[in-house]
Amino acid sequence: MKKLIKFAMIALAYSMVTACATNSDVENLQAQVNDLDASVKQASADAVSAQTICADATEKSIAAKNAADRAARFSRKANAKLGKKLRKSMIK
């Protein structure tokens, strides 16, 4: 009977030590999960910010292209008018 009680005490002590180590491991893993969760949230926020910046840049590039096209049309019209005036002056 004494051997059984002695064995039970050793088993109890071992299980307590093992349980503490397991709790510590769980706490470490939880801390890592929390860090990863924060990193994922930051990456997601950065991605949203990048998408917004990209959309703004796209709008600006479309506006710049439209302005360049408009300037090219005006330039062609001006060149055509100047060409007509030059030909008229050459004929006189």
Image (cartoon, helix red, strand yellow):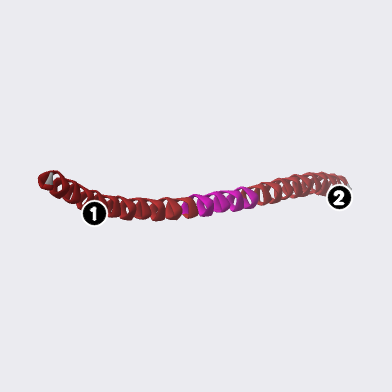
| Left or right, residue 53 beside residue 85 | left
Quadrant, the N terminus: top left
Question: Does the magenta portion include 87?
Answer: no
Part of the protein shown in magenta: 39-53
Q: Position of residue 9 (x, y in %)?
A: 19, 51
Numbered circles on residues, count: 2
Nearest the viewer among 53 and 79 is: 53
Q: Position of residue 44 (x, y in %)?
A: 55, 49
Q: Say which amino acid is labelled 1.
A: Val
SS of the residue under disc 2: helix
| Left or right, residue 34 beside residue 48 | left
Q: Position of residue 54 (x, y in %)?
A: 62, 48
**Taken as a whole, is the magenta stretch helix, strand or loop?**
helix
Inter-mark Cα distance, 1 to 2: 106 Å
Nearest the viewer among 25 and 18 is: 18
- Which residue lies most toward the left here? 3
Q: Say which amino acid is labelled 2.
A: Ser
| Left or right, residue 25 beside residue 44 | left
Nearest the viewer among 37 and 31 is: 31
Question: Does the magenta portion include 45?
Answer: yes
**Label 1 packing within 10 angstroms: few (<14), some (14-19), many (20+):** few
| Left or right, residue 25 beside residue 3 | right
> What residue is pinned by disc 1?
17
| Image point (23%, 49%), residue name | 12
Label 1 vs label 2, nearer the camera: 1
Q: Position of residue 14 (x, y in %)?
A: 20, 50
| Image point (35%, 50%), residue name | 26
SS of the residue under disc 1: helix
- Disc number placed over residue 89 in the picture, else none: 2
